[in-house]
Image: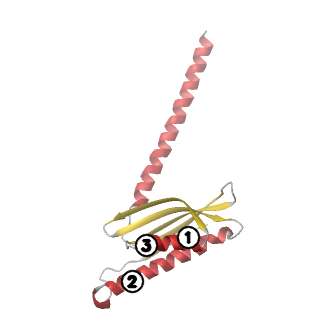
């Protein structure tokens, strides 16, 4: 009778250890997402290739864009993804103090683009930021340069 009881303890202990690992992973993901989702003071572009293909032959990317908030930003983002034939799988957006950060998980058709889609998407987002900066300068007092200049940080990981 003692052997089944020990097996039950071992099973219970294994389940507890597994649950602790899951909770640690969830805590890590939450802490990382909270920090990366808040808009920064600099304009940033990040395009990461996950390296995994989904079951339907698509390449998965995570793209992040941080810039000044403007009313036509979302339509411009949607137009970029549409023109590159990319499908949005997940979107997280945070706006704070006139700044916004958009984090998109997108899928591109493996046969149409391949891994070079990272560069297509990165270049399209860069041109979007350049247009945003140009519009901001034109809107500032009489076409004068904005007092607050922003640096552009670009990150590409393949």
Identify the mark nearer the N-term, 1 or 3: 3
Figure quadrant of the C terminus: bottom right
Q: Tell me the residue that label 3 is attached to.
A: 73
Give residue 33's mark.
none
The mark that comes first in sequence, 1 or 2, is 1
Image-based side of 121 in relation to 137, left or right: right
Residue name at image x 47 percent, y 50 percent: 29
In this orientation, which residue lies closer to the viewer: 62 or 9?
Answer: 62
Q: Quadrant of residue 15?
A: top right
Residue drawn at (40%, 55%), measured in percent from left and top?
34
Secondary element type, mark 2: helix
Q: Nearer the viewer, residue 6 or 88?
A: 88
Numbered disc 1: secondary structure: helix
How packed mark 1 is, by other alpha carbons closer than 10 Å (few <14, some 14-19, many 20 or more), is: some
The residue under label 2 is 135
Above or below 82: residue 138: below
Residue 50 point in image, percent of width and height = 60, 60
Left or right: where 97 falls relative to 47:
left
Residue 91 coordinates in the image, percent (x, y): 49, 60
Q: Residue furthest left?
A: 141
Q: Earlier in the sequence, mark 2 or mark 3?
A: 3
> Which residue is the site of mark 1?
81
> At 54% from the left edge and 76% from the top edge, which residue is drawn?
124
Q: Of residues 68 and 86, which is closer to you in this image?
A: 86
Residue 133, horizontal then vertical, whole percent: 40, 81
Q: Are marks 1 and 2 in contact (CB under 8 Å)?
A: no
Q: Is residue 10 above or below residue 106?
A: above
Q: x, y (%) of residue 18? A: 54, 35
């Amino acid at each position: 009778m003692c052997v089944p009881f020990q097996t039950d303890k071992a099973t219970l202990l294994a389940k507890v250890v597994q649950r602790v690992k899951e909770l640690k992973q969830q805590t890590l993901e939450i802490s990382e997402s909270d920090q990366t989702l808040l808009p920064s003071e600099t304009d940033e572009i990040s395009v990461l290739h996950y390296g995994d293909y989904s079951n339907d032959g698509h390449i998965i990317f995570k793209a992040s864009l941080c810039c000044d908030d403007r009313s036509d930003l979302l339509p411009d983002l949607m137009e970029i993804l549409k023109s590159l034939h990319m499908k949005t799988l997940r979107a997280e957006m945070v706006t704070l103090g006139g700044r916004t950060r958009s984090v998109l998980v997108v899928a591109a058709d493996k046969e149409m683009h391949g891994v070079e889609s990272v560069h297509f998407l990165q270049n399209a987002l860069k041109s979007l930021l350049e247009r945003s900066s140009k519009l901001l300068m034109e809107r500032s007092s009489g076409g004068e340069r904005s007092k607050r200049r922003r640096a552009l940080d670009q990150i590409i990981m393949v």
